[in-house]
Amino acid sequence: VWTNTCCSHPLHGMEVNEVDGPEDVKDGSVRGVKAAAVRKLEHELGIPVGELPVENFKFLTRLHYWAADTVTHGEKSPWGEHEIDYVLFITIPSKDSITLKPHPDEVDDVCWVTQSKLLEMFADKDLLFSPWFRLIANRWMIGGGENGKGGWWDDLDRTMNTDDFCDYENIHCFDPPAEHLGGGGDAGPWLDVKEEEAAPSANGNDSTVGDTSKKQGAYGKIKTHKESKLKQLMHLDEVCSAISLLYINPLKSNLESDNIQKSFNADDLAFCDDILCKVSRSFAAVIRQLPSEMLVDVLIFYLVLRALDTIEDDMTFFDSNEEKVKVLLAFHKTALVDPEWTMTGCGEGDERRLLEEFPKCHSVYAALREDSRRVISDITFRMATGMAEFVDKDLGQGTMDVKQYNRYCHFVAGLVGEGLSRLFSASGLEKPSLATELYLSDQMGLFLQKTNIIRDYLEDYVDGRAFWPQTVWKKYSASGDLGYFANPATAEHETAALNCLNELVTDALELVPDCLSYLSKLRCAEVFRFCAIPQVMAIATLDKCYHNKDVFSGVVKIRKGMSCALINGTTDVCGVHSIFSRFASSILSQAEVARKKGFEDPSYERTVKACNTILELTETEAKKSGGSIVRSTLMLSTAAVGCLTYKYPDGSNTTALTTAIASVGIFSLFKSSFMKYVVGKKGVPSLMPASKLAEKKEG
């Protein structure tokens, strides 16, 4: 097992005192810990006392950490550790400046590494590393996190000669990586991945550096499974889709329209737009393309619910659950009524900023139409009521049953669907009857939420708030613990995990008919696209998750190029049906291939039925579409590949590749437009842009 240079293990009763008091920690001297480090460096590595003077060590911070030794001694290992560690750094002029004589009973090998070499070793699955060293290296030593700051190792001169990275006030808390959960006591996450922020650092600087996420819970702390950039670029059809979406036919923002700019405070609206991009980049573009009659209404609706969700998600801010419930239930009467209401210190990163600067959101909210404010307030209160119901529930092992699973999804997503339907209807661009489609609105929300819950299994489990229903997963977990599926180590283990996963994917697929029914009731092109884009992303994600063991070792995501292709395919009903048909066929194919290979899936018949139902519902429109942009570009992608080796007389081949890809994209767009023209001539109902609907209404 590779690890850091040395662990000091301070002892009581040593001739050179190794015990530090509160004042030693407060001023950063910690001479006791440093003396212990000198002693252990001699004991383990044979470095003579005196070669590394105590005053040369730099104390940076502390961490509270535990781990079960399950990797070495099995999932029921009786061994583990639970400790508070002091992190020390020391630098030397060269390798030759110290004497190394490793003790054979303590050290098997020593390796001097660069940053790139260490990262390469981390990626080698045949090498084992101590969990505490991985945490420290990824969290603090090596930079590149979302906050853009360098790590301790990135600037050793600054680390060793300033206090910029020193934090003597806080003890940072870490649960171990998923593979070190469990042990003889079946230990699960409890320290949380967030930090104990008792006070700002003594020097007033933000000491959080390196690869740390500023999202709540376990978001960003779990490995993301994604294809390399090279593999993504090999999907030339998706490259063309990305070019098309970015440069040829991008989603148009209507935020700068005159009636919006005249109706709201410019600075407050700019803040709302900026914070929307920060807390949900994927939703920002979809919301901006909505017609001006409802764009700001939906934007504020989203931000209000995101603020509420931030309060509900924060597991450390409130002194008690009773206090959290009180704040949740009063949110619609405080945040949406009091223009000065704000909350400081709750949440992380941009979500925290949203709460702290909420008066700017209130300013825009207060300027909305009364009917829109009424919808937002009503849904906010009902969602808060649902959240309050779940605050006291122990979700460490998921929801109790499918009924509770559905109820949770209804509160956090189904109600969003209802609120949106009511806002669409209130704008006058959709029929009044859409506001009464409560069941379909709810099912559409459940489809999206269940997809996220399935994909986020490991993140949610590590965060200590999981949602997979126990009546489903306990059928497959040999240990009776939801963590049984994390990083399956045996074939039997993996089979059980995939059986559970496939059942939950199938449960979500059974919601698709209602989602398609809802989409069929829309008449505004921009509203249709707003609703369709998340839906096609969800069916693509379910296809990616189905029978995929990667779900249990990280988060699986669809390719960015595929996302662009899916967005391009949501301009009409035919394109959306084509996408649903494509992924239903893919899941069906995966199920059949697994069956032929001997995989006995208890949900197989149910999966086949769900996929065939989707195929039957989408068959007519999918055929009329003439194939999605994805397929039409794929037919010509070989042309681009063939151009890769072509050279002009001057030796240039860049223009050849660019011309080929552009040609594919242009042809694809032409084909798509032509097929839509033909389909329109055949009498397929077409969606109308908001401007045409408004003219029709006035006429």
Image (spheres, helix red, strand yellow):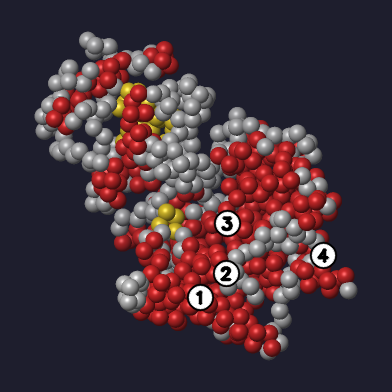
> Which residue in the protein does label 1 denote?
665
The residue under the point 16% across, 34% down is 107
> Which residue in the protein does label 4 denote?
428
For this orientation, the residue located farthest to the front is: 650
Label 3 to label 2: alpha-carbon separation: 19 Å
Where is 667 relative to 287, above or below? below
* Near-viewer residue (669 or 104): 669
Q: Earlier in the sequence, mark 4 or mark 3?
A: 3
The residue under the point 23% across, 40% down is 113
Q: Earlier in the sequence, mark 3 or mark 2?
A: 2
Q: Which mark is residue 282?
A: 3
| Amino acid at the residue labelled 4 | Gly
Q: For the image shown, how many numbered marks are present on the structure?
A: 4
> Which residue in the protein does label 2 denote?
248
| Amino acid at the residue labelled 1 | Gly
Q: 661 left or right of 106? A: right
